Image (tube, grey):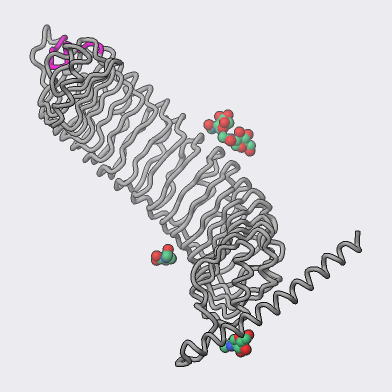
Amino acid sequence: MWRLWLLPLGLVYGHACPQKCTCEQAGSVQCFRVQAVPPGLQRDVRSLKLPYNHIKEIKVIYCCLSLICMSDFSMLMELEDISLASCGIETVEVGAFGLQRSLRSLDLQKNKLRQVPRGLPAGLETLRLGHNRIHSLQESTFEGLRRLRVLELHNNLISSLRGNSLSPLVRLDRLYLDANRMEAVQGTLRLPQLHLLSMESNKISSLSSAFFALLQSLRTLRLSGNLLARVPHDLPQGLLHLNLDHNQIRALRSRDMAQLRNLSVLSVSNNRLASVDGGLRLPNLTVLEMPGNNLRALPSRLAPRLERLDCGQNGLQEVGHQHLSAMRHLKHLFLENNTIKHFEGHALRSCFQLTNLALEQNHLSTVPEGLPETLVRLDLKLNRIAAVGEKELRGLKRLQVLNLRNNRLTTLGLPALLHLPRLRRLYLDQNPWNCSCELLRVKRTLLARGVDVAGELCHGPGHAPGDGWRASLLEQDRCEDHIREAAEREQLQVTDIEEDYDYGV
Ligand SMILES: *[C@@H]1O[C@H](CO)[C@@H](O)[C@H](O)[C@H]1NC(C)=O
Ligand SMILES: *[C@@H]1O[C@H](CO)[C@@H](O)[C@H](O)[C@H]1NC(C)=O
Ligand SMILES: *[C@@H]1O[C@H](CO)[C@@H](O)[C@H](O)[C@H]1NC(C)=O
Ligand SMILES: *[C@@H]1O[C@H](CO)[C@@H](O)[C@H](O)[C@H]1NC(C)=O
Protein backbone atom coordinates (compact mmCIF):
# COMPACT_ATOMS: atom_id res chain seq x y z
CA MET A 1 0.00 0.00 0.00
CA TRP A 2 2.84 2.38 0.84
CA ARG A 3 4.11 2.17 -2.70
CA LEU A 4 1.14 4.26 -3.70
CA TRP A 5 2.47 7.27 -1.85
CA LEU A 6 6.14 6.59 -2.34
CA LEU A 7 5.85 6.76 -6.07
CA PRO A 8 4.66 10.37 -6.31
CA LEU A 9 7.41 11.43 -3.88
CA GLY A 10 9.97 9.82 -6.12
CA LEU A 11 8.62 11.90 -8.96
CA VAL A 12 8.70 15.14 -7.02
CA TYR A 13 12.40 14.82 -6.25
CA GLY A 14 13.29 13.63 -9.67
CA HIS A 15 14.69 10.45 -11.07
CA ALA A 16 17.22 9.95 -8.27
CA CYS A 17 15.02 8.59 -5.54
CA PRO A 18 14.90 4.81 -5.81
CA GLN A 19 11.81 2.80 -5.27
CA LYS A 20 11.04 1.94 -1.65
CA CYS A 21 12.77 5.13 -0.51
CA THR A 22 11.70 8.60 0.45
CA CYS A 23 14.11 11.37 -0.41
CA GLU A 24 14.13 14.74 1.25
CA GLN A 25 15.73 17.80 -0.15
CA ALA A 26 18.37 18.12 2.53
CA GLY A 27 20.20 15.06 1.23
CA SER A 28 18.33 12.77 3.56
CA VAL A 29 17.02 9.38 2.40
CA GLN A 30 15.03 6.72 4.18
CA CYS A 31 14.29 3.31 2.65
CA PHE A 32 11.88 0.57 3.60
CA ARG A 33 11.82 -3.19 2.97
CA VAL A 34 15.22 -3.38 1.36
CA GLN A 35 17.87 -6.05 1.77
CA ALA A 36 20.84 -3.93 0.79
CA VAL A 37 21.68 -0.34 0.02
CA PRO A 38 19.32 0.41 -2.88
CA PRO A 39 21.13 1.17 -6.14
CA GLY A 40 20.52 4.52 -7.78
CA LEU A 41 20.87 6.74 -4.73
CA GLN A 42 22.15 10.20 -5.44
CA ARG A 43 25.83 10.45 -4.68
CA ASP A 44 25.58 13.47 -2.48
CA VAL A 45 23.28 11.86 0.07
CA ARG A 46 24.38 12.91 3.53
CA SER A 47 21.94 11.09 5.75
CA LEU A 48 20.88 7.53 5.02
CA LYS A 49 18.32 5.83 7.20
CA LEU A 50 17.67 2.14 6.70
CA PRO A 51 16.18 1.03 10.02
CA TYR A 52 13.90 -1.99 10.30
CA ASN A 53 15.09 -3.63 7.14
CA HIS A 54 16.44 -7.06 6.58
CA ILE A 55 20.17 -6.78 5.98
CA LYS A 56 22.23 -9.66 7.27
CA GLU A 57 25.73 -8.46 6.46
CA ILE A 58 27.54 -5.36 5.33
CA LYS A 59 30.10 -6.80 2.95
CA VAL A 60 33.26 -5.53 1.38
CA ILE A 61 33.19 -6.31 -2.32
CA TYR A 62 36.88 -5.92 -2.99
CA CYS A 63 39.90 -4.13 -1.60
CA CYS A 64 42.59 -2.42 -3.59
CA LEU A 65 46.13 -2.71 -2.23
CA SER A 66 44.35 -3.78 0.96
CA LEU A 67 43.87 -0.09 1.68
CA ILE A 68 40.80 1.09 -0.16
CA CYS A 69 37.85 -1.20 0.08
CA MET A 70 34.59 -1.01 -1.80
CA SER A 71 31.25 -1.91 -0.32
CA ASP A 72 27.61 -1.13 -1.01
CA PHE A 73 28.19 2.23 0.60
CA SER A 74 31.30 3.18 -1.34
CA MET A 75 29.59 5.37 -3.94
CA LEU A 76 28.03 7.49 -1.18
CA MET A 77 31.13 9.31 -0.10
CA GLU A 78 29.36 12.32 1.38
CA LEU A 79 27.51 10.32 4.01
CA GLU A 80 27.59 11.89 7.46
CA ASP A 81 24.96 9.88 9.19
CA ILE A 82 23.97 6.23 8.68
CA SER A 83 21.28 4.38 10.58
CA LEU A 84 21.07 0.63 10.28
CA ALA A 85 19.22 -0.03 13.52
CA SER A 86 17.08 -3.15 13.86
CA CYS A 87 18.16 -4.80 10.60
CA GLY A 88 19.30 -8.18 11.89
CA ILE A 89 22.92 -7.43 10.92
CA GLU A 90 25.35 -10.14 12.00
CA THR A 91 28.59 -8.88 10.50
CA VAL A 92 30.10 -5.67 9.25
CA GLU A 93 33.28 -6.45 7.33
CA VAL A 94 36.47 -4.54 8.03
CA GLY A 95 36.59 -1.40 5.94
CA ALA A 96 32.93 -1.48 4.86
CA PHE A 97 32.63 2.22 5.68
CA GLY A 98 36.24 3.00 4.82
CA LEU A 99 35.47 5.59 2.16
CA GLN A 100 33.01 7.63 4.21
CA ARG A 101 35.49 10.23 5.33
CA SER A 102 32.68 12.54 6.42
CA LEU A 103 30.85 9.98 8.51
CA ARG A 104 30.02 11.39 11.95
CA SER A 105 27.29 9.11 13.24
CA LEU A 106 26.78 5.38 12.80
CA ASP A 107 23.76 3.71 14.35
CA LEU A 108 23.96 -0.09 14.51
CA GLN A 109 21.85 -0.67 17.59
CA LYS A 110 19.47 -3.60 17.92
CA ASN A 111 21.28 -5.96 15.57
CA LYS A 112 23.03 -9.26 16.04
CA LEU A 113 26.63 -8.11 16.02
CA ARG A 114 29.08 -10.19 18.02
CA GLN A 115 31.96 -7.77 17.65
CA VAL A 116 32.56 -4.08 17.34
CA PRO A 117 33.08 -3.40 13.61
CA ARG A 118 36.68 -2.52 12.74
CA GLY A 119 38.22 -0.04 10.45
CA LEU A 120 35.55 2.59 10.99
CA PRO A 121 36.26 6.09 9.63
CA ALA A 122 38.47 8.18 11.84
CA GLY A 123 36.06 11.13 11.90
CA LEU A 124 33.28 9.19 13.60
CA GLU A 125 31.79 11.02 16.60
CA THR A 126 28.84 8.85 17.60
CA LEU A 127 28.76 5.06 17.51
CA ARG A 128 25.62 3.29 18.67
CA LEU A 129 26.03 -0.42 19.32
CA GLY A 130 23.50 -0.97 22.10
CA HIS A 131 21.35 -4.13 22.08
CA ASN A 132 23.69 -6.43 20.15
CA ARG A 133 25.57 -9.58 21.13
CA ILE A 134 29.03 -8.15 21.61
CA HIS A 135 30.86 -10.18 24.23
CA SER A 136 34.30 -8.64 24.42
CA LEU A 137 36.33 -5.58 23.56
CA GLN A 138 39.80 -6.32 22.19
CA GLU A 139 42.81 -4.09 22.57
CA SER A 140 42.73 -2.89 18.99
CA THR A 141 38.96 -2.61 18.66
CA PHE A 142 38.77 1.16 18.75
CA GLU A 143 42.05 2.02 17.16
CA GLY A 144 41.97 5.22 15.19
CA LEU A 145 38.69 6.57 16.55
CA ARG A 146 40.30 9.66 17.96
CA ARG A 147 37.25 11.84 17.46
CA LEU A 148 34.63 9.57 18.96
CA ARG A 149 32.55 11.39 21.56
CA VAL A 150 29.64 9.05 22.25
CA LEU A 151 29.94 5.27 22.50
CA GLU A 152 26.89 3.17 23.30
CA LEU A 153 27.51 -0.45 24.23
CA HIS A 154 24.61 -1.05 26.60
CA ASN A 155 22.63 -4.30 26.53
CA ASN A 156 25.38 -6.52 25.16
CA LEU A 157 27.16 -9.52 26.63
CA ILE A 158 30.44 -7.94 27.65
CA SER A 159 31.81 -9.76 30.68
CA SER A 160 35.00 -7.91 31.34
CA LEU A 161 36.49 -4.57 30.59
CA ARG A 162 40.17 -3.80 30.32
CA GLY A 163 41.01 -0.17 30.73
CA ASN A 164 43.45 -0.02 27.85
CA SER A 165 40.98 -1.33 25.26
CA LEU A 166 39.34 2.10 25.28
CA SER A 167 42.53 4.14 25.36
CA PRO A 168 42.42 5.23 21.70
CA LEU A 169 39.23 7.16 22.44
CA VAL A 170 40.97 10.29 23.65
CA ARG A 171 37.96 12.56 23.01
CA LEU A 172 35.29 10.28 24.39
CA ASP A 173 32.68 12.26 26.30
CA ARG A 174 29.97 9.68 27.11
CA LEU A 175 30.30 5.92 27.54
CA TYR A 176 27.33 3.62 28.10
CA LEU A 177 28.04 0.07 29.27
CA ASP A 178 24.79 -0.61 31.13
CA ALA A 179 23.14 -4.01 31.17
CA ASN A 180 26.13 -6.15 30.27
CA ARG A 181 27.64 -8.96 32.28
CA MET A 182 30.66 -7.20 33.68
CA GLU A 183 32.01 -8.64 36.88
CA ALA A 184 35.52 -7.38 36.71
CA VAL A 185 36.95 -4.16 35.50
CA GLN A 186 40.71 -4.15 35.19
CA GLY A 187 43.35 -1.55 34.76
CA THR A 188 42.96 2.16 34.36
CA LEU A 189 40.41 3.80 32.16
CA ARG A 190 42.43 6.45 30.39
CA LEU A 191 39.75 8.73 28.99
CA PRO A 192 40.78 12.28 29.80
CA GLN A 193 37.65 13.92 28.37
CA LEU A 194 35.01 11.51 29.62
CA HIS A 195 32.10 13.32 31.29
CA LEU A 196 29.62 10.52 31.72
CA LEU A 197 30.21 6.86 32.53
CA SER A 198 27.21 4.62 32.89
CA MET A 199 27.67 1.00 33.99
CA GLU A 200 24.28 0.22 35.51
CA SER A 201 22.90 -3.29 35.82
CA ASN A 202 26.10 -5.29 35.67
CA LYS A 203 27.64 -7.55 38.29
CA ILE A 204 30.45 -5.36 39.48
CA SER A 205 31.40 -6.02 43.09
CA SER A 206 34.37 -3.70 43.35
CA LEU A 207 36.26 -1.04 41.47
CA SER A 208 39.89 -0.30 42.21
CA SER A 209 41.26 3.16 42.83
CA ALA A 210 43.40 2.80 39.74
CA PHE A 211 40.33 2.44 37.57
CA PHE A 212 39.35 6.08 38.12
CA ALA A 213 42.83 7.58 38.25
CA LEU A 214 42.73 9.03 34.75
CA LEU A 215 39.13 10.14 34.51
CA GLN A 216 39.79 13.70 35.52
CA SER A 217 36.83 15.15 33.59
CA LEU A 218 34.22 12.71 34.88
CA ARG A 219 31.09 14.50 36.14
CA THR A 220 28.43 11.79 36.11
CA LEU A 221 28.97 8.22 37.29
CA ARG A 222 26.13 5.73 37.27
CA LEU A 223 26.69 2.40 38.97
CA SER A 224 23.20 1.41 40.06
CA GLY A 225 22.16 -2.24 39.98
CA ASN A 226 25.55 -3.80 40.74
CA LEU A 227 26.97 -5.77 43.66
CA LEU A 228 29.04 -3.07 45.31
CA ALA A 229 29.44 -3.56 49.05
CA ARG A 230 30.99 -0.14 49.58
CA VAL A 231 31.48 3.20 47.89
CA PRO A 232 34.50 2.84 45.58
CA HIS A 233 37.69 4.52 46.78
CA ASP A 234 39.23 7.51 45.07
CA LEU A 235 36.28 8.52 42.95
CA PRO A 236 37.16 11.40 40.63
CA GLN A 237 37.14 14.67 42.53
CA GLY A 238 35.13 16.64 40.00
CA LEU A 239 32.01 14.39 40.16
CA LEU A 240 28.70 16.21 40.21
CA HIS A 241 26.29 13.25 40.03
CA LEU A 242 26.83 9.85 41.59
CA ASN A 243 24.25 7.09 41.41
CA LEU A 244 24.78 3.95 43.51
CA ASP A 245 21.16 2.78 43.80
CA HIS A 246 20.40 -0.93 44.15
CA ASN A 247 23.75 -2.14 45.46
CA GLN A 248 24.71 -3.60 48.83
CA ILE A 249 26.43 -0.65 50.42
CA ARG A 250 26.28 -0.59 54.22
CA ALA A 251 27.80 2.74 55.14
CA LEU A 252 28.61 6.17 53.77
CA ARG A 253 31.92 7.20 55.25
CA SER A 254 33.73 10.50 55.14
CA ARG A 255 37.01 8.94 54.23
CA ASP A 256 35.55 7.46 51.02
CA MET A 257 33.80 10.63 49.97
CA ALA A 258 35.42 13.68 51.48
CA GLN A 259 37.19 14.56 48.25
CA LEU A 260 33.87 14.95 46.37
CA ARG A 261 33.64 18.61 47.12
CA ASN A 262 31.65 19.45 44.01
CA LEU A 263 29.19 16.56 44.30
CA SER A 264 25.68 17.87 43.86
CA VAL A 265 23.45 14.78 43.57
CA LEU A 266 24.07 11.55 45.47
CA SER A 267 21.67 8.65 45.18
CA VAL A 268 22.13 5.55 47.32
CA SER A 269 18.59 4.23 47.42
CA ASN A 270 17.82 0.55 48.00
CA ASN A 271 21.09 -0.46 49.57
CA ARG A 272 21.80 -1.70 53.07
CA LEU A 273 22.85 1.57 54.61
CA ALA A 274 22.81 1.38 58.38
CA SER A 275 25.00 4.36 59.01
CA VAL A 276 26.08 7.63 57.53
CA ASP A 277 29.08 9.32 59.09
CA GLY A 278 28.13 12.36 61.12
CA GLY A 279 29.83 15.23 59.40
CA LEU A 280 29.80 13.69 55.95
CA ARG A 281 30.27 17.24 54.83
CA LEU A 282 29.80 17.47 51.13
CA PRO A 283 29.72 21.22 50.68
CA ASN A 284 27.88 21.29 47.36
CA LEU A 285 25.43 18.44 47.87
CA THR A 286 21.89 19.56 47.09
CA VAL A 287 20.10 16.22 46.60
CA LEU A 288 20.54 13.13 48.76
CA GLU A 289 18.42 10.08 48.00
CA MET A 290 18.53 7.24 50.53
CA PRO A 291 15.12 5.54 50.48
CA GLY A 292 14.94 1.81 51.00
CA ASN A 293 17.82 1.36 53.45
CA ASN A 294 18.23 0.31 57.07
CA LEU A 295 18.77 3.68 58.69
CA ARG A 296 17.52 3.89 62.26
CA ALA A 297 18.29 7.55 62.71
CA LEU A 298 18.45 10.54 60.43
CA PRO A 299 22.05 11.37 59.64
CA SER A 300 23.01 14.62 61.27
CA ARG A 301 25.08 17.55 60.07
CA LEU A 302 24.91 16.24 56.57
CA ALA A 303 25.42 18.88 54.00
CA PRO A 304 24.64 22.54 54.49
CA ARG A 305 23.29 23.09 50.98
CA LEU A 306 20.91 20.18 50.89
CA GLU A 307 17.61 20.99 49.18
CA ARG A 308 16.13 17.55 48.93
CA LEU A 309 16.53 14.71 51.41
CA ASP A 310 14.80 11.38 50.92
CA CYS A 311 15.00 8.92 53.80
CA GLY A 312 11.73 7.15 53.08
CA GLN A 313 11.40 3.41 53.68
CA ASN A 314 13.97 3.10 56.40
CA GLY A 315 13.69 2.24 60.07
CA LEU A 316 13.59 5.79 61.44
CA GLN A 317 11.80 6.04 64.77
CA GLU A 318 12.16 9.66 65.67
CA VAL A 319 12.94 13.08 64.30
CA GLY A 320 14.64 15.64 66.47
CA HIS A 321 15.98 19.09 66.00
CA GLN A 322 19.60 18.00 66.29
CA HIS A 323 19.22 16.01 63.05
CA LEU A 324 18.00 18.81 60.89
CA SER A 325 19.48 21.93 62.36
CA ALA A 326 21.76 23.66 59.87
CA MET A 327 19.58 22.60 56.90
CA ARG A 328 18.56 26.06 55.95
CA HIS A 329 18.10 25.25 52.29
CA LEU A 330 16.00 22.14 52.63
CA LYS A 331 12.87 22.32 50.46
CA HIS A 332 11.75 18.70 50.22
CA LEU A 333 11.92 16.22 53.06
CA PHE A 334 10.69 12.67 52.47
CA LEU A 335 10.34 10.48 55.56
CA GLU A 336 7.45 8.26 54.49
CA ASN A 337 7.14 4.61 55.35
CA ASN A 338 9.30 4.59 58.46
CA THR A 339 8.23 3.87 62.01
CA ILE A 340 8.41 7.42 63.28
CA LYS A 341 6.52 7.71 66.54
CA HIS A 342 8.16 10.74 68.03
CA PHE A 343 8.54 13.98 66.14
CA GLU A 344 10.05 16.63 68.37
CA GLY A 345 8.08 19.90 68.44
CA HIS A 346 9.76 22.53 66.24
CA ALA A 347 12.29 19.96 65.00
CA LEU A 348 12.29 21.70 61.63
CA ARG A 349 12.62 25.21 62.95
CA SER A 350 15.87 25.81 61.04
CA CYS A 351 14.38 24.67 57.75
CA PHE A 352 13.31 28.08 56.60
CA GLN A 353 12.53 26.95 53.08
CA LEU A 354 10.76 23.65 53.53
CA THR A 355 7.74 23.36 51.25
CA ASN A 356 7.16 19.64 51.03
CA LEU A 357 7.02 17.23 53.97
CA ALA A 358 6.15 13.57 53.46
CA LEU A 359 5.37 11.70 56.67
CA GLU A 360 2.88 9.17 55.42
CA GLN A 361 3.00 5.57 56.65
CA ASN A 362 4.47 6.20 60.07
CA HIS A 363 3.34 5.75 63.64
CA LEU A 364 2.47 9.34 64.51
CA SER A 365 -0.46 9.88 66.84
CA THR A 366 -0.55 13.66 66.48
CA VAL A 367 0.28 16.21 63.84
CA PRO A 368 3.83 17.42 64.65
CA GLU A 369 3.89 20.79 66.33
CA GLY A 370 5.71 23.86 65.12
CA LEU A 371 6.11 22.90 61.47
CA PRO A 372 7.66 25.61 59.31
CA GLU A 373 5.20 28.11 57.94
CA THR A 374 6.69 27.72 54.46
CA LEU A 375 5.06 24.28 54.06
CA VAL A 376 2.89 23.89 50.97
CA ARG A 377 2.23 20.14 51.09
CA LEU A 378 1.96 17.98 54.18
CA ASP A 379 1.27 14.28 53.84
CA LEU A 380 0.21 12.44 56.99
CA LYS A 381 -1.84 9.61 55.55
CA LEU A 382 -1.60 6.16 57.11
CA ASN A 383 -0.64 7.26 60.60
CA ARG A 384 -2.48 6.94 63.92
CA ILE A 385 -3.66 10.49 64.31
CA ALA A 386 -6.84 10.67 66.39
CA ALA A 387 -7.25 14.43 66.66
CA VAL A 388 -6.14 17.57 64.88
CA GLY A 389 -5.86 20.60 67.11
CA GLU A 390 -5.61 24.31 66.43
CA LYS A 391 -2.18 24.43 68.00
CA GLU A 392 -0.57 22.20 65.36
CA LEU A 393 -1.97 23.91 62.30
CA ARG A 394 -1.61 27.47 63.46
CA GLY A 395 0.97 29.26 61.38
CA LEU A 396 0.79 27.07 58.29
CA LYS A 397 -0.20 30.04 56.22
CA ARG A 398 0.91 28.62 52.92
CA LEU A 399 -0.31 25.08 53.25
CA GLN A 400 -2.24 24.05 50.15
CA VAL A 401 -2.47 20.30 50.38
CA LEU A 402 -3.08 18.36 53.57
CA ASN A 403 -3.48 14.61 53.52
CA LEU A 404 -5.04 12.99 56.59
CA ARG A 405 -6.45 9.96 54.84
CA ASN A 406 -6.34 6.66 56.71
CA ASN A 407 -5.92 7.86 60.24
CA ARG A 408 -8.03 7.52 63.39
CA LEU A 409 -9.97 10.75 63.23
CA THR A 410 -13.56 10.80 64.48
CA THR A 411 -14.14 14.53 64.58
CA LEU A 412 -12.65 17.63 63.05
CA GLY A 413 -12.89 21.08 64.55
CA LEU A 414 -13.54 23.89 62.12
CA PRO A 415 -11.37 26.43 64.00
CA ALA A 416 -8.24 24.32 63.38
CA LEU A 417 -8.81 24.34 59.65
CA LEU A 418 -9.59 28.01 59.54
CA HIS A 419 -5.92 28.58 60.34
CA LEU A 420 -5.07 27.42 56.84
CA PRO A 421 -5.97 30.32 54.56
CA ARG A 422 -4.42 28.82 51.43
CA LEU A 423 -5.78 25.30 51.80
CA ARG A 424 -6.89 23.94 48.42
CA ARG A 425 -7.08 20.21 48.85
CA LEU A 426 -7.85 18.15 51.93
CA TYR A 427 -7.91 14.35 52.05
CA LEU A 428 -10.05 13.00 54.87
CA ASP A 429 -11.39 9.65 53.71
CA GLN A 430 -10.71 6.33 55.41
CA ASN A 431 -11.12 7.63 58.93
CA PRO A 432 -13.64 6.32 61.49
CA TRP A 433 -15.69 9.51 61.34
CA ASN A 434 -18.50 10.20 63.74
CA CYS A 435 -20.93 11.37 61.13
CA SER A 436 -22.50 14.18 63.11
CA CYS A 437 -24.14 17.39 61.98
CA GLU A 438 -21.01 19.16 63.14
CA LEU A 439 -18.86 17.20 60.70
CA LEU A 440 -21.29 17.91 57.89
CA ARG A 441 -21.03 21.59 58.74
CA VAL A 442 -17.24 21.49 58.65
CA LYS A 443 -17.32 19.89 55.25
CA ARG A 444 -19.82 22.39 53.86
CA THR A 445 -17.83 25.32 55.16
CA LEU A 446 -14.66 24.01 53.57
CA LEU A 447 -16.37 23.45 50.24
CA ALA A 448 -17.83 26.94 50.40
CA ARG A 449 -14.31 28.29 50.85
CA GLY A 450 -13.21 26.50 47.69
CA VAL A 451 -11.34 23.67 49.41
CA ASP A 452 -11.49 20.45 47.47
CA VAL A 453 -12.40 17.81 50.03
CA ALA A 454 -11.32 14.63 48.33
CA GLY A 455 -13.07 11.38 49.04
CA GLU A 456 -16.45 10.78 50.66
CA LEU A 457 -16.50 11.56 54.39
CA CYS A 458 -19.94 10.49 55.36
CA HIS A 459 -22.80 10.03 53.01
CA GLY A 460 -25.13 11.92 55.26
CA PRO A 461 -25.71 12.31 58.97
CA GLY A 462 -25.42 9.03 60.82
CA HIS A 463 -28.44 7.12 62.03
CA ALA A 464 -28.99 3.81 63.68
CA PRO A 465 -29.25 0.89 61.28
CA GLY A 466 -32.80 0.01 60.26
CA ASP A 467 -34.11 3.56 60.64
CA GLY A 468 -35.02 3.84 57.03
CA TRP A 469 -35.11 6.87 54.84
CA ARG A 470 -37.77 8.75 56.80
CA ALA A 471 -35.55 8.90 59.89
CA SER A 472 -32.63 9.85 57.71
CA LEU A 473 -34.56 12.71 56.19
CA LEU A 474 -35.69 13.92 59.59
CA GLU A 475 -32.10 13.88 60.74
CA GLN A 476 -31.03 15.75 57.68
CA ASP A 477 -33.60 18.46 58.44
CA ARG A 478 -32.31 18.65 61.97
CA CYS A 479 -28.80 19.03 60.60
CA GLU A 480 -29.87 21.77 58.24
CA ASP A 481 -31.28 23.73 61.19
CA HIS A 482 -28.13 23.06 63.17
CA ILE A 483 -25.91 24.20 60.37
CA ARG A 484 -27.96 27.34 59.75
CA GLU A 485 -27.86 28.31 63.40
CA ALA A 486 -24.17 27.67 63.65
CA ALA A 487 -23.52 29.72 60.53
CA GLU A 488 -25.52 32.60 61.98
CA ARG A 489 -23.55 32.42 65.19
CA GLU A 490 -20.36 32.48 63.25
CA GLN A 491 -21.54 35.40 61.16
CA LEU A 492 -22.15 37.33 64.38
CA GLN A 493 -18.70 36.47 65.66
CA VAL A 494 -17.04 37.48 62.45
CA THR A 495 -18.86 40.81 62.47
CA ASP A 496 -17.78 41.31 66.06
CA ILE A 497 -14.17 40.69 65.19
CA GLU A 498 -14.32 43.07 62.27
CA GLU A 499 -15.84 45.73 64.46
CA ASP A 500 -13.15 45.20 67.04
CA TYR A 501 -10.59 45.61 64.34
CA ASP A 502 -12.23 48.81 63.16
CA TYR A 503 -12.17 50.23 66.64
CA GLY A 504 -8.54 49.32 66.90
CA VAL A 505 -7.74 51.50 63.93
C1 LIG B 1 34.68 22.15 41.23
O1 LIG B 1 33.88 23.13 40.62
C2 LIG B 1 34.53 24.37 40.43
C3 LIG B 1 33.51 25.35 39.92
O2 LIG B 1 32.75 24.84 38.90
C4 LIG B 1 35.71 24.17 39.49
O3 LIG B 1 36.39 25.37 39.30
C5 LIG B 1 36.65 23.13 40.07
O4 LIG B 1 37.69 22.86 39.18
C6 LIG B 1 35.90 21.86 40.38
N1 LIG B 1 36.76 20.92 41.06
C7 LIG B 1 37.17 19.79 40.51
C8 LIG B 1 38.05 18.96 41.34
O5 LIG B 1 36.83 19.46 39.40
C1 LIG C 1 31.34 24.07 45.55
O1 LIG C 1 31.39 24.92 46.68
C2 LIG C 1 32.44 25.85 46.70
C3 LIG C 1 32.33 26.64 47.97
O2 LIG C 1 31.98 25.85 49.03
C4 LIG C 1 32.40 26.73 45.47
O3 LIG C 1 33.51 27.58 45.45
C5 LIG C 1 32.39 25.87 44.23
O4 LIG C 1 32.27 26.64 43.08
C6 LIG C 1 31.26 24.88 44.28
N1 LIG C 1 31.26 24.04 43.12
C7 LIG C 1 30.23 23.91 42.32
C8 LIG C 1 30.37 22.99 41.19
O5 LIG C 1 29.20 24.51 42.52
C1 LIG D 1 7.48 0.31 53.04
O1 LIG D 1 8.76 -0.14 53.40
C2 LIG D 1 8.91 -1.54 53.43
C3 LIG D 1 10.32 -1.84 53.85
O2 LIG D 1 10.80 -0.91 54.77
C4 LIG D 1 8.63 -2.11 52.05
O3 LIG D 1 8.72 -3.51 52.10
C5 LIG D 1 7.25 -1.69 51.60
O4 LIG D 1 7.05 -2.12 50.27
C6 LIG D 1 7.12 -0.19 51.66
N1 LIG D 1 5.76 0.20 51.31
C7 LIG D 1 5.49 1.11 50.41
C8 LIG D 1 4.04 1.35 50.16
O5 LIG D 1 6.35 1.73 49.84
C1 LIG E 1 -20.72 11.74 67.81
O1 LIG E 1 -21.01 13.12 67.83
C2 LIG E 1 -22.16 13.51 68.56
C3 LIG E 1 -22.43 14.99 68.35
O2 LIG E 1 -21.25 15.74 68.33
C4 LIG E 1 -21.94 13.14 70.05
O3 LIG E 1 -23.08 13.44 70.76
C5 LIG E 1 -21.63 11.65 70.13
O4 LIG E 1 -21.31 11.28 71.46
C6 LIG E 1 -20.47 11.27 69.24
N1 LIG E 1 -20.29 9.82 69.23
C7 LIG E 1 -19.10 9.26 69.37
C8 LIG E 1 -19.09 7.77 69.30
O5 LIG E 1 -18.08 9.89 69.54
Image location of residue 6, percent across then percent down: 17, 24
Along the line of sight, the residue nearer the viewer: 458 or 74: 458
* Residue at image coords 53%, 72%: 383
Q: Is residue 340 positioned above or below 126 on the image?
A: below
Furthest toward the left, the residue is: 61
Image location of residue 251, percent across then percent down: 47, 55
Q: Is residue 72 within the magenta segment?
A: yes
Q: How many marks?
A: 0
Q: Main secondary structure of the magenta part?
A: loop
Viewport quadrant of the C terminus: bottom right
Q: Quadrant of residue 344?
A: bottom right
Q: Quadrant of residue 320?
A: bottom right
Image location of residue 79, percent across then percent down: 25, 15
Task: Give the quadrant of ligand 3.
Answer: bottom left
Magenta stretch? Answer: 68-78
Viewport quadrant of the N terminus: top left
* Residue at image coords 54%, 78%: 408
Inspect this view and state whether residue 9 appears. yes
